[in-house]
Image (tube, rainbow, N blue to C red):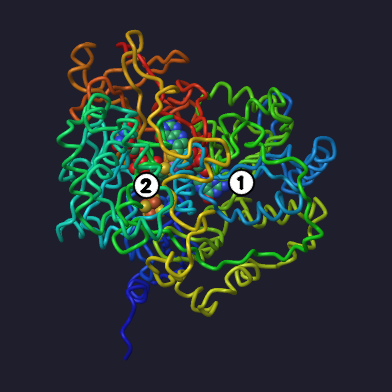
Amino acid sequence: MSQQTTREIINGIRGTKTVPGVCMICPWHCPTENFVKDGRIEYVRGNEYAANRTTRCVKGISSIHSSRDKDRLLYPMKRNSAGVHERISWDQALTEIAGRLKKIKDEFGPESLVSLFHLDSNEMFTHQLFGHLYGSPNLSGHGAACDQDRRLAALSTFAHPLPVKDYANSRFVMLWGADPFGPNEALHENRELLEAMKRGCRLIVVDPNRSRTAEKAHIWLPIKPGTDGALALAIAHRIVETQSYDKSFCDEWVHGLAEFSEHVLSNGYTPQWAEGITGIAKETIIAVADEFAATKPALMDGLKGLVNYTTGLDALRTVFALNVITGNIDGPGNLILKEMSPLGFPLEIPEEEATIPEKPPIAYGMGYPLAPDLPTQLLPKAVLEDDPYPVKALFFHVCNPAMSDPNTRLFEKMMAAVELSVTVDIYMSETAQLSEYVLPEASTYERAEVRESMWAGPQTVLAQPAIAPLGESRPYYEIIKGLAEKMGYGAYFAWDSWEDWARTCTAYLPVPYEELKEKGVWEGELRYRKYNTDGVPTSTGKFEVYSTMFEEMGYHPLPVFNEEHRVKPDADYPFQLVNCKMQYHCGTHTQNNPYLMAIVGENYVEINSLDAARLDVREGDLVEVASPHARATIRVRTSEAVQPGVARVPHGHGFGRRFGSIARGRGTHINPLFETRANPVSGGISFNECKVKITKA
Ligand SMILES: Nc1nc2c(c(=O)[nH]1)N[C@H]1C(S)=C(S)[C@@H](COP(=O)(O)OP(=O)(O)OC[C@H]3O[C@@H](n4cnc5c(=O)[nH]c(N)nc54)[C@H](O)[C@@H]3O)O[C@H]1N2
Ligand SMILES: Nc1nc2c(c(=O)[nH]1)N[C@H]1C(S)=C(S)[C@@H](COP(=O)(O)OP(=O)(O)OC[C@H]3O[C@@H](n4cnc5c(=O)[nH]c(N)nc54)[C@H](O)[C@@H]3O)O[C@H]1N2
Ligand code: SF4
Ligand SMILES: [Mo]
């Protein structure tokens, strides 16, 4: 008898059937398995054929609630003249939206539609309908709020937007402003890092706060907020001065080492200089630089703790340059330039049917030609002032910028003024509440999805509907098909079931469709050092520590430490407000989840106990946090993990009128405190550039 799989054993015991799925809670998109009985999800876990294996984090497992949540959106709605949302039919919703979109295109051009999404869920349908056919150049992920600066730094250095980490084979890992053992738990990566550490891999963490990851680190560098760029340049200075870079790798594969070296030496970016800025002793900087240069394989990476400052883009460029000049790129134990699966588009649309936009993407007109994603915090300018050109229609899918963009009051003003707004969500999110039309999507448990996931090699997930959609909710591909039909493009969406387009998308994969469907995941080979066979697609054919892309666009080709745009605490606003994620929640997805809310039901501001004593506040007290822009009342946590002078807030709760019976009224929405601030090159949102004062409420 052949050996049973664990799926078969579980199904035997529980009387269930396994339907492969995908987790939609955080950007890691772990491949999953849903165990179904009588139209109900009984049990969920990770996909045993995928790198994450059968594991899923607490947030992912708890998301089973969204397959049953009575507070979900159940039917399409439209705002009436009194500002109240009323139930309408799908036919009315799609007919009216299609008619309005056609009118807007005729009057203002296709570029006046902006379509925004996060987590990239079945967005190939958005691209076909709103991009290719309708002709808008303004379809964008919500990356300006997320990892924009990291992506631009990676594109300019590696010509690749998304390096991932091969912790498993590493001997030296240095993380800057990233907390993988805290909130950001990509499960297989964390397991690999812990195992590597057991085998002797060193972990160095740069963070003003003693994060979960800093707690586990061999060396924690408690840096002054926003100054990582200076530390990274000082490490580069030491490596250049001691010539401890990988000379033969640089000769063959690195563009600009001479200019980079001259730059760090002549500008005096010494460890001594950095000590005064960062608060990290020069001896420590030298020791870390020497250890990094001497240990192979190594990797250095950074995330939100860098991205959230105007100094973050150049800090990340320097961090990526350090990987490159030491020969630590795309090999075992390095940052890996992830190879994507060969996925096709679901529909064939002839070239002659495409609408070619006459205007460039709006980011160009806003002055951000290198922005990987649209700087959404600047959308109000386009809608309210026609700058750089009129935007008349806003379409939101799987994102909630009313909660996640800065300057919430301005966002609300924009939503009140825009001609047409449509939100597709599974809840009545804050953005949905501000939209004219609200369309209910079927949850991830009720729909199919073909997508690339985050494992270091190519990884396709074929998620399949496990249960029927709740109420009248529909999968996104059916919503877009319905809209396309009303817009006169029905012929291109002429499939009957999701399997028709799923087969088309996955036809190039080296695995039979039936096997992919059965397993739910396909993983290709994790190829290392692909530059040896494929080259590096920069204009010089090399990894660039002197960026020709920046130079061509008139930006400094080398990273600098420029504090010109930085907001620092002062006598009136003595705290730097810094953001982080909440370990047991994700973005604004999870605040109506009873299991997660039982663990943490509201957010809070963390301050050092010395500051708390000075302000005469105790753990659990309410305080008022005021920026020059707005104020918010929030509960205090006192902590030694946060430096004096720093106030740290996890994002996602609050707004006072959050959707859902469990979420409503719990926690504090902090985004009204933030002004509209953009990194001057990437257009990314600099959330941590915020000074506040704190008083007892
Ligand atoms: N549980 C959970 N997991 C998530 C998410 C979630 O909402 N919840 N969100 C997902 C998403 S969308 C993202 S983008 C990732 C983000 O993943 P991370 O970037 O790893 O998450 P953060 O909690 O924002 O961590 C930022 C860290 O930067 C530190 N920091 C603040 N200022 C500075 C500074 O000046 N310098 C340095 N070096 N560090 C600084 C903070 O103290 C904090 O520890 O997480 C993903 N995973
Ligand atoms: N103050 C502050 N603001 C931040 C951050 C911070 O650290 N601090 N972090 C920033 C970061 S890194 C990011 S990535 C952004 C995230 O911000 P957004 O891109 O706006 O994403 P979420 O907040 O996660 O919103 C997800 C929305 O999608 C809905 N949703 C969930 N599942 C589905 C589904 O299957 N279908 C549909 N149609 N909708 C679904 C949820 O109900 C929710 O309304 O926030 C940014 N904003
Ligand atoms: S790490 Fe993210 S994608 Fe994976 S199970 Fe947890 S929430 Fe879901
Ligand atoms: Mo993010």
- Disc 2 marks a residue whose amino acid type is Ala
> Label 1: how many residues lie within 10 Å, few (<14), some (14-19) or many (20+)?
many
Q: Is residue 533 left or right of residue 494?
A: left
Question: Quarter of the image containing the C terminus?
Answer: top left
Pinpoint residue 92: horizontal percent, then vertical percent.
77, 44
Quarter location, residue 572: top left
* Observer-nearest of 423 and 224: 224
Q: Residue at x 67, y 28 (%)?
A: 382
Q: Residue at x 78, y 45 (%)?
A: 98
Q: Residue at x 64, y 67 (%)?
A: 501
Disc number for residue 611: none
- Disc 1 marks a residue whose amino acid type is Pro
Pinpoint residue 674: horizontal percent, then vertical percent.
46, 23
Q: Nearer the viewer, mark 1 or mark 2?
A: 2
Quarter location, residue 77: top right
Disc 1 target residue: 440
The answer to which of marks 1 and 2 sits earlier in the sequence is: 2
Q: Is residue 398 left or right of residue 688?
A: right
Q: Secondary structure at mark 2?
A: helix
Residue 645 in sight from this viewpoint: yes
> Label 2: how many residues lie within 10 Å, few (<14), some (14-19) or many (20+)?
many
Quarter location, residue 579: top left
Pinpoint residue 601: horizontal percent, then vertical percent.
34, 34
Disc 2 target residue: 321
476 up-or-down from 343: above or below: above
Q: Residue at x 30, y 38 (%)?
A: 232
Q: Is residue 697 left or right of residue 503?
A: left
* Observer-nearest of 315 and 252: 252
505 up-or-down from 207: above or below: below
